[in-house]
Amino acid sequence: MGHIRLLQHLLPPTSYSAEAPRLRAQLHAEGNALDAALAASVRAVMGIDPFRAQEWLPDWERVYGLPDACSHPDTTLQERIMALAIAVQEQAGLSRAWFTRLAMLLGYRVVVHEYPPFCAGSHAGDMLTNGDWQWAWGVAAPAITERRFSAGRSAAGETLSSWGDHLLECVFRRLKPAHTEVLFSYGGTNAPD
């Protein structure tokens, strides 16, 4: 039942006739306005989830300060959505598992490793602090990472495939603990298949 009928039912039954020309025109105008407001409210509720309603993407990017230093001029829709996912997840944690999941959101399969410090079980003659290496950690990624065009996550006019790791390195360097250094290796023995 539309809002026109609902408004007609609100009229006192004996005092007003819903078929009177002026009243009918007013009920139609107000009923149509309420129908339009209801339809807009459904779209607004979908905007609560930034990954379901792409029409709200510019607003979500504005809220999270995107595009940022890791963006490039030819950013695809899929990369914009990934950047937003990273911005939403930014406060989640700083563990190896968190960085691995972060890389998955960016479309990379990586292995995060740390350089072990001297501890029980270390051998005589091993360095006690590993020098500056105690603040370094590594990310091993495949030699080639490909992003493919995906219906619903890409837009018309975008390339069908793209390669490169600028986004991975930029995001990791931005989110790493400030006192650490992250080293990247591609296609080595530690890299995922």
Image: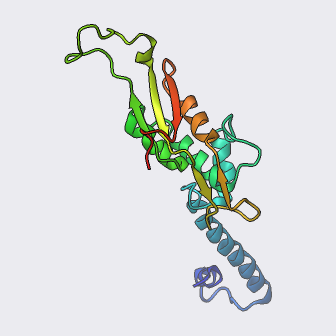
Residue 64 locus on image (x, y percent): 62, 40
Q: Residue furthest left?
A: 121
Q: Is residue 46 above or below residue 167?
A: below
Rendering colour mode: rainbow
Q: Residue at x 75, y 77 (%)?
A: 29
Position of residue 133 in the picture relative to residue 174 (left or right) = left
- Considering depth in this image, is 84 or 193 the residue closer to the camera? 193
Number of marks in the image?
0
Residue 6 locus on image (x, y percent): 59, 81
Position of residue 115 in the picture relative to residue 32 (left or right) = left
- Asked where in the image residue 48 lies, by quadrant, the reply is bottom right
Residue 67 locus on image (x, y percent): 69, 41
Position of residue 109 in the picture relative to residue 171 (left or right) = left
Residue 59 locus on image (x, y percent): 67, 49
Q: Is residue 12 above or below residue 79?
A: below
Q: Residue at x 75, y 90 (%)?
A: 20
- Asked where in the image residue 23 lies, by quadrant, the reply is bottom right
Q: Residue furthest bottom?
A: 19
Which quarter of the rendering shows the N terminus? bottom right
- Considering depth in this image, is 71 or 19 the residue closer to the camera? 71
Q: Residue at x 66, y 53 (%)?
A: 162
- Considering depth in this image, is 56 or 119 the residue closer to the camera? 119
Q: Is residue 127 above or below residue 44?
A: above
